[in-house]
Amino acid sequence: MIFPIGDDNIQGDSKPWITYTLIALNVLIFGYMFFLPSNEIRGIYDVYATTPTEILNGEEFSTLMTNMFLHGGILHLLGNMLFLWIFADNIEIVLGKIPFILFYIAGGVFASLAHVFTNMDSSIPSLGASGALAAVMGAYIVFFPKSRVKVLVIYLFRNIYISAIWFLGAWFAMQLFSSFREIGKDPDSAGTAWWAHIGGFVFGVGVAYILKKMKIVEPQKFKAVA
């Protein structure tokens, strides 16, 4: 088992305050909900998480955005925030603060729609930052394919470095494999919104490729921090 614990950061004109704010906001919301009775938590999920059948009935469109600030458990939160902390800061520095937050939200909405249209009969609310995070990771693989991702290998009790194109490529392949494995199953039995991850990642790759191709963003101009 491996998981990322760092990467090659780049130097910008300011700290990635939007990334830090997103992490803090997600943690604060989860901390607030942690002390609520279970029936109130379910009520929040019903109101702010994305339910495919409701969206396709023309209802609760705002949940396409609000769901990305909710998490179903401490491991769900910590996993997403770890990935956000590792990968989002470089993207924020390259895009700039306002474009980054717009990109993050748009990626999350696109990811939510990908989940909705691949689970049209599902009445289970979906939630989490992973769709927006997948968009960030998609942009990362385009902007910084040769960046080194530091991963902890549990079985070896040591850290190793893997290039971003291999690490994120393997992550995306795992999402595809997992999504195809769910084909034919009851949509309400799935525990992970695989197509939200896939949709967010494709969105991030597409937007980043266009920005890089048109030279609106030139990530190669940013220097790595030693």
Image (cartoon, rainbow, N blue to C red):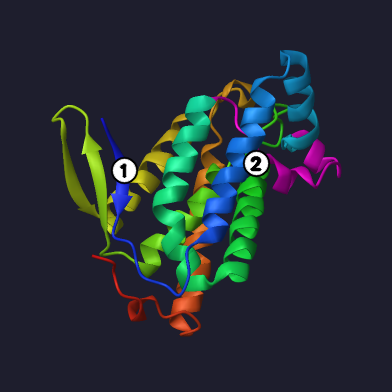
Front-lying residue, 198 or 1 = 1
**According to the image, label 2 marks what residue?**
69
Q: Is residue 23 magenta?
A: no
Location of residue 184 by image quarter? top right
Q: Position of residue 132 (x, y in %)?
A: 56, 50
**According to the image, label 1 marks what residue?**
4
Query: What residue is drawn where x is 33% and y is 52%?
Result: 169
Location of residue 142 by image quarter? bottom left
Left or right relative to 182: residue 57: right
Marked residue nearer the N-terminal end (1 or 2):
1
Left or right relative to 17: residue 119: right
Query: What residue is drawn where x is 31% and y is 43%?
Result: 5
Left or right relative to 31: residue 20: left
Location of residue 63 by image quarter? top right
Q: Which mark is residue 51?
A: none
Q: Position of residue 166 (x, y in %)?
A: 26, 53
Q: As displayed, is residue 181 above or below residue 80?
A: above
Label 2 sits on what residue type?
A: Phe
